[in-house]
Image (cartoon, rainbow, N blue to C red):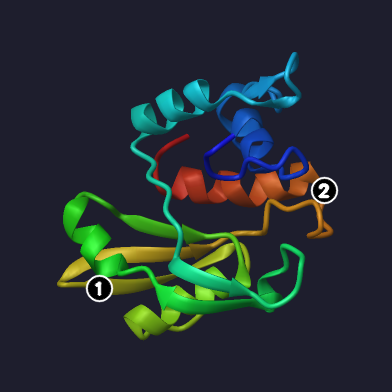
Amino acid sequence: MEFYYPNWNNDMWRITGLLFFNDKDYFVDKTKKAFCKARLISFLQEKGIALFDTASAIRRLQDNASDKFLEVVQPTDIPALLHRIPQCKAIVTTGEKATDTLCTQFSIDKPKVGDFTEFLFENHPMRLYRMPSSSRAYPLALEKKAAAYRIMYQDLQML
């Protein structure tokens, strides 16, 4: 699947299905053992959720998915993205590298996992939420990850 969080072993779409539809397999296409991209896109558009990478160019220093072995060659211009979506109230990161990249761009303190930092972007109040990684390499049960995401979605009045 050419989309965000496509890895079958990543729980992002299971967390989302559990929270919004009380079904961790809501976005699963069981016949293909994959996530249903069309269903995801429809849901994200309906909820006003945008996804983007914090880096436009990276270099993998080792042959694995770990953030600590990623070098950000060119960070994404997040302020330019925010100008295109002025109604945005929050940015969410799910990894250490993404969080560090955003905190550097906005000169803000890094929130603890499961928490947020408030900041102003051109006099517009924003929040940076740092959520638990949805990767199964992050040692936290699906239900506990979902509980942290539930708080964020409730804060943002999306649940």
Residue at 17%, 59% (x, y): give it.
83
Q: Secondary structure at mark 1?
A: strand
Q: Residue 61 in the image: x percent, y percent?
A: 69, 78
> Which one is in front, 12 or 18?
12
Q: Residue furthest top?
A: 31
> Which one is in front, 80 or 112?
80
Q: Which mark is residue 141?
A: 2
Quadrant where the image shows the N terminus = top right
Of label 2 and label 1, which has the lower sequence position? 1
Report the amino acid beneath label 1. Leu
Residue at 54%, 38% (x, y): give it.
2
Residue at 81%, 58% (x, y): give it.
137
Report the amino acid beneath label 2. Ala
Tag 1: Cα neighbours inside 10 Å, few (<14), some, or many (≥20)?
few
Picture layout, residue 83 above or below residue 2: below
Task: Indicate the quadrant where residue 5 lies.
Answer: top right
Residue 156 located left or right of residue 71? left
Q: Secondary structure at mark 2?
A: loop
Q: Is residue 60 visible?
A: yes
For label 1, the residue is: 120
Picture layout, residue 80 above or below residue 21: below
